[in-house]
Amino acid sequence: MLLRLVPEKTDIKFLSMRKVALVLSALLLIGSVVLFFTRGLNYGIDFKGGVNLFMQVENGATADISRIRSISAANVVGEVKVKEFGAKSDVLISIEKQPGGSKEQNDALKTVQEALITAMPNLKFQSSEVIGPQVSGELKRDGMIAVTIAIIAVLIYIWFRFEWQFGLGAVVALMHDILLTIGFFSITDLEFNLSIIAALLTIVGYSLNDTVVVYDRVRENVRKFRKMSMEDMLDLSLNQTLSRTMMTSVTTLVALLALFFLGGEVIRGFTSAMIWGVAVGTYSSVFVASPMLLIFKLKREAMLLDDEKRDPTVDKSKLTPFDHV
Amino acid sequence: MLNFPRWKVLMILAIMLLGILTSLPNFLNEAQRRELPGFMPEQTLSLGLDLQGGVYLLFEARTADVIATRLTNLAAQVRDVSLAEGRRRDIPRAERVTFSGIKVQGNGVTFTLRNPELVGAARDKLLPFTQAEVGTNALGAAGATEMELSVVGAQFTLSLTEQGILIQQRDAIARSMEVIRRRVDPDGVKEISLKPSGSNRIVLEVPGAENPEELIALIGKTAKLSFHDVATNLSATDIEAERFSKARYSKVVLKDGGYIVIHNREIVSGDDLTDAKPSFDQGNRPAVAFTFNTSGAKRFGNHTAKNIGRPFAIKLDDTVISAPNIQSAILGGSGIITNIGTTVEAKELATLLKSGALPVALTVETQKTVGPDMGADGVAKGQLAAGIGFIGVVIYMVLSYGRFGLAANVALITNLILITGMLSAFQATLTLPGIAGIVLTIGMAVDANVLVFERIREEYRSGKKPFQAVEQGYAQAFSTIIDANITTFIAAAVLYMLGSGPVQGFAVTLAIGILTSMFTAILLTRLILTVWLTRARPAKLPI
């Protein structure tokens, strides 16, 4: 007997839930945007400049965080955050950007590191990072450009492969996922750094993957069931792909959970973002991307005309390019 | 759909064999790797700094300085032309092309022709400047004109062209990188990586290094060496009050304390050195022995021959380290610099002098240091996470799809082998986020198979025979697989193009993962299932 997450045949009326889902999504989106502007993000030094110093107490003894904090703070200007990093003996010291240029940041690392090792000889250096103010500004800008370009590229690709309603629907779902992830980072106060941009782009890829699978089925069903109402047809497509959607979410989550619990502190922020993104991406491909096709008034006739002319893979009763692979 | 011509089977097997060969070195130790026959690849995964420990430094070069220096030199060259012409005795003064008011202005040098009637002759005189090309390569491909001449009345302006400026800057970065390499790795034994980034930055990675301060100090030293005549005609009070021509002399700190006034003009400079090595003086104190090139040796010989008994100053950066008296003409083109300090300092100075002076000032914009323990820890944790994630997915696939799940798992293992092989063969750097990318690929790689299997289930349920169900399942899932993977690939490509360092490493593994998972899902599992179906001819599909 094989394991089944989803019963063999489902007939869930997803589209009838669209009003509730859209209200819920709208509220979450507004919440995320409000949080972003009021509470902001806990930017890592990648994006705001400054110093990270990671030290470890020898022999696994517990680190005296308050002492480390006072010694560090005495040697630099501005805020110093000291926190346990993965284990009791490990501490991460984050020093706010020092006034001045990159030289001041480098000096701050040197002074704090020396002061700490002099005062507490059992502290061992693990790793450090210094980002100058100029580079951090550029990284932030490049990160935003990357996410924007990825979205535009995807919009163009889907537009080209499907209809414009699909492209827009996918992009709405994507923005939904990205904004909610930003809201997630704002509310959890997890550090937002360069690897989170990587996570955001991977979420973009993943969420799209899900959305495209559903859309592909919609495109196919438009041809197959010419009499069915658009809403029923969307429901049918979602139910047909539900098993696959759940299956892939679970395998990806299995891998991500292994990373989250075993991969170490350094990539925990990344994996948190990804786990959240997979959950949100799966939700949005069902409850956001598909209703968007109704909202944007997808026309069956236009699709039928277009597809036959230009896309050999749509009509699945004929030979496909796959046969030549 | 399900028929595989022989060549296709052979191609699939060949790709798998290639994957095994290229990933094999990673599972052998060094001695075993050495014993591999010559045709087999020996490269292992190249680990990023975050996994093997080391120092990463991002330097920013003040390339504006290069242009400023070039312009100052240009002004001096124009002045030389004017002076040489002014000294000519073969033509009357009125016919000599001389200039006045030579000064640097914006991106050029302006000057006035003393006799406005000689514009044509002046243009000819300045031809070598405007015809000079920069950026020509060994193949003789045309470079760009470095500067342009514009003339308004008797007012001349030699200005650097935009391309000229760009090439100068690029050249300065290239020379700086060479200097950095010689300073950090004088013997060429460390596996340092040195790359330009953007138009004015340099990225240096030194695996295994633990002290960034040491590296920064070593690289940050300009080590500009020059030999000067000492001004002996000034009284102590004049020196105190700085009553001397600043254009000709300057007051410089002496290493042993106090000041000394030297001529600005260099007799010879560090640029003329061909060799420098640590040595000892007659008193057995640390010193640096140096050798000049031919032209440097000639100039130094001439000067010392004419100035026996007078002192000369050896200036390093902003300090005169010693000012010995010339005992006799030094004609051989070599000598020693004394008053260095310790043997360590002598060794360092020799390295610096040999590497030459940095053409631009460098500032450290980013530094990252990862201790060796931390890197090893990252590898161990990444391997564990990948292992557990892998096992989890493998079990889950068998539970969900039974026999078909086994086929998908063969594909998954092949997938990992191919990723390892490709990363090793192309020497793409594996970083911690890269490992995350691989683990994520494990989760997502089965997606293509999941799509196919779900489709097969559907077809089978709708009453198709096993063979037709599998055939249709593959056929119908095709466009979905392509669309879904291309969109993820777009995201990975954007990440690679715009990301930096570790993020790029992640993008590479993700992109490779997409390619290999397409191969394994579309070709490999299909082959496995086809073989099984044709051999077993099952009446029912176990899915």
Image: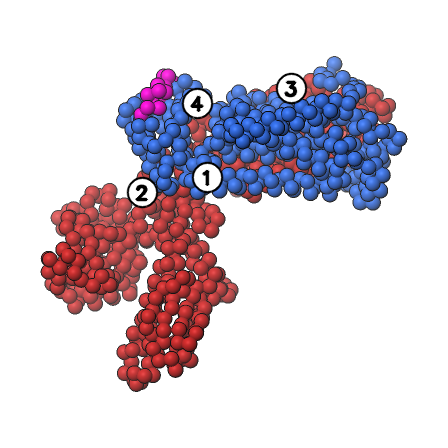
Chain colours: A blue, B red
- Eye-nearest disc, 4 or 2: 4
Instruction: Kindly identify the residue that appears in the image at 15 percent across and 48 percent down.
Output: B256
Marks 4 and 1, Cα distance to the nearest angstrom? 23 Å
The secondary structure type at the circle numbered 4 is loop
Which residue reaches farthest top?
A: A1
Query: Mark 2 = which residue?
Result: B217
Query: Mark 4 = which residue?
Result: A85
Q: In which quarter of the image is residue A62?
A: top left
Query: Mark 1 = which residue?
Result: A136
Q: Which chain carries label 3?
A: B
Left-right relation of A63 to A251: left
Marks 3 and 4, Cα distance to the nearest angstrom? 32 Å
Left-right relation of A271 to B289: right
Q: Which region shows up in magenta?
A: A57-71
N-terminal-most mark, 4 or 1: 4
Instruction: Kindly identify the residue that appears in the image at 87 percent across and 32 percent down.
Output: A226
Marks 2 and 3, Cα distance to the nearest angstrom? 54 Å
Query: Mark 3 = which residue?
Result: B395
Instruction: Kindly identify the residue that appears in the image at 47 percent across and 32 percent down.
Output: A44
- Eye-nearest disc, 2 or 3: 2
Dot 3 amino acid type: Ile
Q: How crowded is mark 4: few (under 14 residues within 10 Å), some or many (20 or more)?
A: some
Q: Position of residue B501 (x, y in %)?
A: 49, 39
Left-right relation of A225 to B210: right
Marks 1 and 2, Cα distance to the nearest angstrom? 23 Å
Dot 1 amino acid type: Ser
Depth order, front residue of B420/A221: A221
- Eye-nearest disc, 1 or 2: 1
Q: Quadrant of residue B11?
A: top right
N-terminal-most mark, 2 or 3: 2
Dot 4 amino acid type: Phe
Same chain for mark 3 and mark 4? The answer is no
